Image: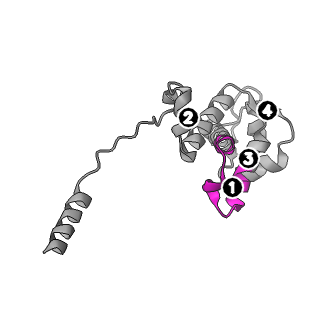
Amino acid sequence: MKYFIGLALLLILCSQPSYAKSELPYGCDEYSKVEENSFVLFNKKQFIELGECAGEALVKAKKVYNIAAACSEVVEDKNSLLGIFSLSKAEAIKMGVCIGAIRAVYNRYDRELVLVNSRYRSTKHYYSCKKGMAAVNELVASAKDEYYKRSELRDILCDRV
């Protein structure tokens, strides 16, 4: 009888919807409102999301610093046996900056028509941009400078087709 009551109680608890609410915001605008003391409670995934927001903002501001070092953290994490569990908070933010910068360049330039002589040519050319690990490997291999403009990142990550 006590097993039946335990099983019934377990089924009731498992079938109830979860009313837990995430206290941390999902949008980039919400990260600016988080107080400094709240960063202690962030997990690695949230630090990566914070870095993604920062990477997108840096690309939009046309000032991206140390992108090769940030992207090397992505490669190091992929090769690590422990994965995200071996990351420090600074490494998680660097990974996010790399991912956010690649996403911003991809969203901005992929399939965008290329202007030649201030007009569109009859044969239309457009940018085809890399994303994912191909883009990360490209940035690690070819990014040598400390500072990049958005157009320089476009030239590294995108090809004219």
Q: Which amino acid does label 3 sit on?
A: Cys
- Say whether residue 1 is left or right of residue 105: left
Q: Which amino acid does label 4 sit on?
A: Tyr
Residue at the location (68% across, 58% down)?
A: 78
Q: What residue type is labelled 1?
A: Asp
Q: Name the residue under label 4.
A: 148
Q: Name the residue under label 2.
A: 39
Give the extent of the magenta segment: 73-96
Secondary structure predominantly adopted by residues drawn in magenta: helix
Pick out the residue farthest to the right.
Answer: 144
> Is mark 3 in CB contact (under 8 Å) with mark 2?
no
> Is mark 2 in CB contact (under 8 Å) with mark 1?
no
The vertical placement of 84 against 10, above or below, is above
Residue at the location (66% across, 46% down)?
A: 88
Q: Mark 3 points at which residue?
A: 71
- Quadrant location of the N terminus in the rendered image: bottom left
Q: Mark 1 points at which residue?
A: 77
Task: Check residue 79 for magenta coloring.
Answer: yes
Mark 4 → mark 1, Cα distance in angstroms: 24 Å
Mark 3 → mark 2, Cα distance in angstroms: 23 Å
- Say whether residue 66 is left or right of residue 129: right
Q: Mark 1, mark 3: which one is toward the viewer? A: 1
